[in-house]
Amino acid sequence: MGAAGDRKTLYRYGYRRSSDQDARETVRWPVVVIGAGPVGLAAAIDLGLRGIPLVLIDDADRIGEGSRGICWAKRTLEICDRLGVGEKLVAQGVTWKLGKVFRGDDLVFSFDLLPEGGHKMPAFINLQQYYLEKALVDRAAEIEAIDLRWKNRLIGVEPRNDFVRLTVDTPDGPYTLDADWVIAADGARSTTRDLLGLKFSGVTFEDKFLIADIRMAADLPTERRFWFDPSFHSGQSALMHRQPDNVWRIDLQLGPDADIAEEQKPERVSARLRRMLGEREFSLEWVSIYRFNCRRLDRFVHGRVVFVGDAAHQVSPFGARGANSGIQDAENLAWKLAAVIKGEAGHTLLESYEQERMQAADENIAHSTRSTDFIAPHSVPERRLRNAVLSLAPKAEFARRMINSGRLSVATVYDTALSTVDEDSFGGTARLGAPIPDAPVRTANGRDGYLLENLGGEFTLLHVQNGALPNLAGIKVVTVGRDIVDKAGLLTGRLDATPGAGFLLRPDQHLCARWRHFDRRKIEAAHARAQGRV
Amino acid sequence: MAKLLSQSRFADPDAAYVTLVEARRGLSEQASADLDTRLVLILANHIGDLDVLREAITLAKAE
């Protein structure tokens, strides 16, 4: 990361003294979450909803304005919907699915990120990160299990045999807190990571990028627009995105030699934007200059400290893979940690968190590195190759497919030991290890809705009615044809759901086993496997 | 007569592109141009069809 700009405070929260600070002996909690950003909040809410008491600490006492995450992907929105804020975010955000790529000033191609209908959540919304954080903070406040403490800054981490002792500084001075488990969600400059002395290695890109949020009442289409070498910003790339409140995100590539102090001056920024926006009136909301990093920890689970989000891995912003993957980390971890704490699963289940989310991090880093390599070539020969692809693109489809302005975040298909290998073959779009695809359904009481909102957050057998219903311990059963009706025929097609078929879903709604015909023994074996009990 | 295929043929076009990028990473302009020339010869021979080669040259030369 480069220099951060000044951040205006949008929402301020008060520091409150906790009784833990007056306790004679250090108080022990099942979970302490470090960092109340989107990832820490999502983890806390998910665990809180699963009945795990926890403390969530943050060194600030406010949600600041500033150029951070704006693009929230479909899977993230589905997770937020399960946590209780999805509909609010979609109502507040700008929904988009169309991307356009220009070479010079000419359109080279456009893409549709969600060409099929029948999903509750859109491919993407754009929404300023502070609105998402505000919605999550409000939601956390409704959950009794969550004790959110502002102005609590982590200054010490001391792993013990079966817990971690944390030292936390406050306006009243420091206190200690014991945690059975610590979730480090404290961002790219993670204090937890530093205090444990962990290496965070990878690639830093030489090119510098100007990122600006501007306010502008412009009648421009709601789509992602990316330019290679436009006339208004010759030799470089540019990206433009709409946010709510007439705010627009603009990224301008500046090259490796740009002078950060000089480029951040408002008159200089305005002149660059003026060339792009012509006569349109605009005002600067926020400006920063960044260099991008792609790096990650060697391990995400360090004893009883588990890293999530940017604290564990960092990517360039092309592809919206940072905050989205962080929230997906939180969801992957929450049900597993809750199962371990409740004694339903052993510690080995957490190894699957590390394995699955490292797979996701590596995918995200690979995609974002490739995008950054395409957008900002390292050398003259690399630039020549890139420009050859761009010049062939209007004439050859293969070249258009190689143009990479960011491959946008999609959920990872876990290649995981928690899945039971298919014994029958299945068509459709559902894939073992992936989130189950959404579809419109009608509930037994006649309400129109969607599949995912009828699943919830526990192990669920989705079963297509065909005679007797399975009776299973610890698994919710949702029967198609009884509990929900496939009103549009899309569910049947997407899952290839024939009568008698069963689909076992993990608490994070990823498909972990499926059968054309099943019996209790098969389901129990798959359930045990998905809890790491094999 | 064989026909030049210009629709994408790689299952993962990004991986193909990055392979070409990595082949030239750290090379000088001259070394990279020499590499590309050798690649042209190798791939032309692999295709082994003069009509396809001529069509490819036409596509590459079109502005």
Image (tube, rainbow, N blue to C red):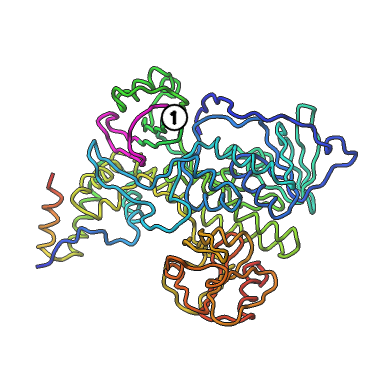
Residue A447, percent from left and from top:
53, 60
The residue located at (23%, 36%) in the rendering is A105
Please say if A346 is above or below B63.
Answer: below
Q: Is residue A216 magenta?
A: yes
Which kind of residue does numbered mark 1 sit on?
A: Asp
Q: Chain of mark 1?
A: A
Q: Specify whether residue A208 is in view.
A: no
Category of crowding for the residue at label 1, using alpha-carbon neighbours closer than 10 angstroms: few (below 14), some (14–19), many (at least 20): many
Which span of residues is magenta-colored? Answer: A215-238
Task: Name which residue lies at 65% across and 69% down.
Answer: A475
Q: Is residue A121 above or below residue A64?
A: below
Q: Position of residue A165 (x, y in %)?
A: 78, 44
Would residue A91 be found to the left or right of residue B20 on screen?
right
- Image quadrant of residue A175? top right
Q: Name the quadrant containing residue A191.
A: top right
The one nearer the camera, A410 or A77, is A77
Name above or below for residue A516 compared with residue A352: below
Q: Position of residue A287 (x, y in %)?
A: 46, 26
Q: Nearer the viewer, residue A387 or A30?
A: A30
Q: In this rendering, is residue A164 above or below A353? A: above
Q: Which residue is mark 1?
A: A213
**Is A211 included in the stretch rendered in magenta?**
no
